[in-house]
Image (cartoon, grey):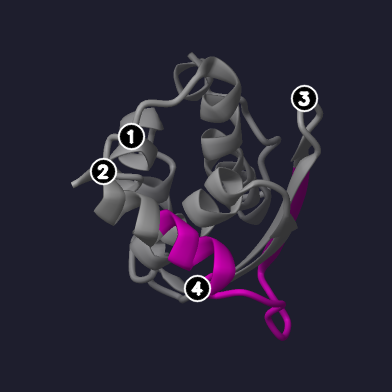
Amino acid sequence: MMDLYREVILDHYQNPHHAGHLDHPDATYSDANTLCGDEITMELKVGPDGRVSDVGFEGSGCAISQASASLLTDQIIGMHIDDVLKLGRQDVLDNLGGIELTPVRLKCALLGLGVLKACVYTYKGEKPARDDEDEE
């Protein structure tokens, strides 16, 4: 079973979903993991109903950070932005199939979630907040 999830991670790393820039995004946010150099930029389009209508991302770094971001982009299409803000560490781990991650690799996996939430806060005109729960 773990081999299947490793294949999913590798596939999302090599063929990321929603890769690239959006035309006229409603919000954009970038961040990096200074421990390993992973970088992610996310862009969102939000419909009048407050739901994510499109998402784009670009990044560089390890397979875990890039696959995690790609999996998140699939998950949030159609979600209300308030529900996006409720996503947490367990959602990311579930997307990755529950693989065991070291603390450093966990930071890699959570980078996309942090960027995504900061992007939503930017859209809402609020200062991006750090979720301590996501970093634990």
Lateral position of residue 24 relative to residue 73, left or right:
right
Determine contact: label 4, label 3, CB under 8 Å: no
What number is the disc on residue 2? Answer: 2
Q: Nearer the viewer, mark 1 or mark 2?
A: 2
**Range of residues picked out in magenta:** 9-31
Mark-to-mark CA distance, 4 and 1: 20 Å
Sequence-earlier tag: 4 or 1: 4
Mark-to-mark CA distance, 3 and 1: 21 Å
Where residue 1 appears, as percent x and y from the top left, is: 18, 47
Q: Is residue 48 magenta?
A: no
**Residue kind at label 1, given as amino acid type:** Ile
According to the picture, the residue beneath numbered tag 1 turns out to be 99
Quarter of the view holding residue 21: bottom right
User: Residue at the location (43% across, 55% down)?
Assistant: 9
Residue 122: in sight, yes or no? yes
Q: Is residue 13 magenta?
A: yes
According to the picture, the residue beneath numbered tag 3 turns out to be 35
User: Residue at the location (53% across, 20% down)?
Assistant: 135
Of 22 and 97, nearer the camera is 97
User: Residue at the location (61% across, 74% down)?
Assistant: 19
Mark-to-mark CA distance, 1 and 2: 7 Å
Sequence-earlier tag: 1 or 2: 2
What number is the disc on residue 17? Answer: 4
